[in-house]
Image (spheres, rainbow, N blue to C red):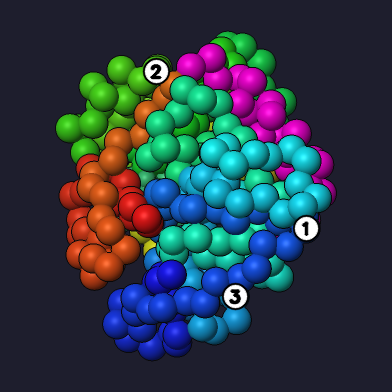
Amino acid sequence: MSGLTCSNYSDFPHNISYEKISSTKCLDHCVRLKIHFSPINPADINMMEGKYLLQPELPFVCGNEGVAEVIECGRSVTQLCVGDFVICPFQNQDSWEGFWKQEMVILEDYCIPFPEFFSLEQASMLSVNPVTAYLLLTQFVSLKPGDVIIQNLANSSVGRWVIHLAKLMGVKTINTVRSSDVVGELKGIGADSVIVEKDRFSANIVQKGQCKLALNGVGGSSSREIAKCLAPYGTMVTYGAMSKEPVSLGNALLIFQNINCTGFNRSRWINETSMDDVKSVFKSLFELMPSFFEIPIYDIFPLNQYENAIGAQLRGGRKGKVLFECC
Ligand SMILES: NC(=O)c1ccc[n+]([C@@H]2O[C@H](COP(=O)([O-])OP(=O)(O)OC[C@H]3O[C@@H](n4cnc5c(N)ncnc54)[C@H](OP(=O)(O)O)[C@@H]3O)[C@@H](O)[C@H]2O)c1
């Protein structure tokens, strides 16, 4: 078997190589999985650069998430059968496997089945972004139908999931984007309002001062403007930093409006949450979804074309996710 290995943190992306990997015996409580698809997420890039919260011991196989098929069951496996498809969202510092390879052997307990209406390509992206969007919407403020929230980075995969899940919850979304090209598309998936970011864009937002929650995946002036839309005692949650600029915030929002600023990271959440509680969150998330929801895919590459795949991921103007087809 072969996979993509990160062997040091200098000179990214030249620190990545396609190498032979030895396979492991499938022990009693384990399943052998054939990995079908795995996306490249911003966190994968951060990890290959050595800049993420979670950095497995070098050398490690890259890839935070994916979709896989059970091809062998250990003698004590009770819940899964050969031919089942699963996601495995439990990777962390101490139990890292890496999805950018053809097979993995993993404890049965680490696997979660998913609704059948997802294609394998879409299911490969279910472990990180949808659950992040769901937790951002449910863990920080109590939202009820009719409440209004604001988010930047609305055209990202997380942003699209926020739009979709908020709609299912009856919550209205104000969404900010960098380009007017995507306004119609985001309205098509349920965005109530889509604003193209310009200088001091909060001035154009009718619901300024009414939002219970602001979701910040950008930082810099974008975070300052969405925070201005919060109601008194509203909460801004920072989960991403795509502009690479520090979060910016007007002093008056803290002093006069008493807004709360906090942050979220899914890998930390996985680390600090019991397996049963994580599974129960995925169950609630899947129960909320009546049907298929699709994240655009830009291109799919075999693992041995990783240089092209990473190049496509790093290029600006990409519309959708870059995926690896692993087997
Ligand atoms: N904290 C967590 O637990 C957690 C979990 C999942 C994801 N995330 C973070 O969420 C963010 C989005 O992830 P994703 O997988 O949804 O990404 P994605 O689908 O690959 O989309 C990336 C987005 O970043 C935008 N972007 C790129 N450069 C930018 C810049 N300089 N300024 C503003 N926007 C920029 C792009 O905007 P255009 O559409 O305009 O090109 C695109 O919408 C990342 O920062 C990721 O690390 C965090």
Q: Which residues are magenta?
A: 270-291
Q: Secondary structure at mark 1?
A: loop
Q: Secondary structure at mark 3?
A: loop
What type is the residue that disc 2 sits on? Gly
Residue 97 appears in which quarter of the rendering?
bottom right
* Residue 78 spot, x, y in % from top left: 78, 41
Give the number of marks: 3
Position above or below: 290 against 133: above
* Quadrant (top left, top right, bottom left, bottom right) of the C terminus: bottom left
- Mark number for residue 28? 1
Position above or below: 31 against 27: above
Q: Is residue 307 magenta?
A: no
- Mark number for residue 56? 3
Residue 189 appears in which quarter of the rendering?
top left
Residue bearing mark 2: 190
Name the residue: 44% across, 64% down.
101
